[in-house]
Amino acid sequence: MMPSMREVIVAANWKMHTSPGDASELARTISARTRVPSVTRVICPPFVALASVRDALAQDDPDVGIGAQNVHHELQGAYTGEISAPMLAGLATWVIVGHSERRRDAGDTDEIIGLKLGRAVAAGLRPILCVGEQLGDREVGRQVDVVRRQLTGALAGHAPSALRHGGLVIAYEPVWAIGTGRNASGQDAAAMSSAIHSIVEDAWGDTRDDTPVLYGGSVTSANIAEFLAESEVDGALVGGASLKPDEMAGIVARAGLTAAARHTSE
Ligand code: 13P
């Protein structure tokens, strides 16, 4: 598959924001302002708001995917405060795994993230696997090595067919660009996206990786065009701006142009 034919995805990571009531309002507003054909939209509210967002969108806009922001690597057990993949049945159809904030704050290692990936896919949750380097890694030109280690660690032991069938999406989120207002350039994102495809192809012994690769890190309606102008970039994982309906409307509208162009070139 040529890069230009891949799905275009805009995923909102609301992080630790919104109560269940706020979340349903916000989801409804965003959904009404982002009905753009051919763009896959996903909203990832906090766990406690999954049900209210599901209920808010069920009638009006069932096309919006609902995702969890994390999942535990075991199915059940003595893990106080944790949520397993089977528990998300009926609440979510997507899940973020390996977000850098969880790598930093919750000790998620590449190995644990790999286990989470397996649990997600086995439970029918479409995973968004996050990877990305620290500023220090980029300053010494080690960004691809870091992402290679993260990806090979997480993908190890998983059959490519299971991850493909499970709809794997990879999000490149350079840590230094998250929540800082300092986004990577479109070229940086495209270069890493190409590197990610090569790493996945090596890991899978495969020559035609068609996994969508998103960019995340200070994405806004003002800079989304720079990323989507790159044929290697298939959309965005949006943090802060995803809580603002105007921002989401602008981002998804721009994604719609890319999606339309990809459809016509099919
Ligand atoms: P910001 O868009 O706030 O930089 O966050 C990006 C992110 O971490 C999305 O998962």
Image (cartoon, rainbow, N blue to C red):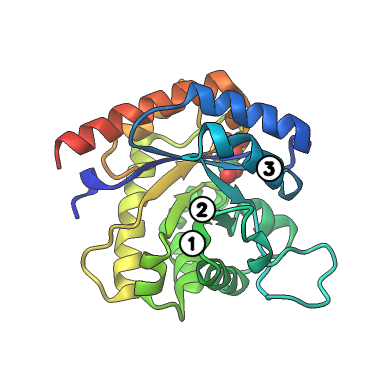
Mark number displayed over residue 132: 2
Mark number displayed over residue 160: none
Q: Residue at x 55, y 66 (%)?
A: 120
Q: What amino acid is at disc 3?
A: Lys
Relative to 150, 229 lies left or right: left
| Residue 81 x/y as whole percent | 83, 62
Q: Quadrant of the C terminus?
A: top left
As measured in the structure, the alpha-carbon distance from the residue carrying label 2 to the one carrying label 3 is 17 Å
Mark number displayed over residue 146: 1
| Residue 64 x/y as whole percent | 50, 39
- Binning the other alpha carbons within 10 Å of mark 1 as few (below 14), some (14 to 19) or many (20 upward) gives some
| Residue 110 x/y as whole percent | 57, 69
As measured in the structure, the alpha-carbon distance from the residue carrying label 2 to the one carrying label 1 is 7 Å
Mark number displayed over residue 15: 3
Q: Quadrant of residue 7?
A: top left
From this view, report whether residue 71 is shown above or below residue 20: below
Foreground label between 2 and 3: 3
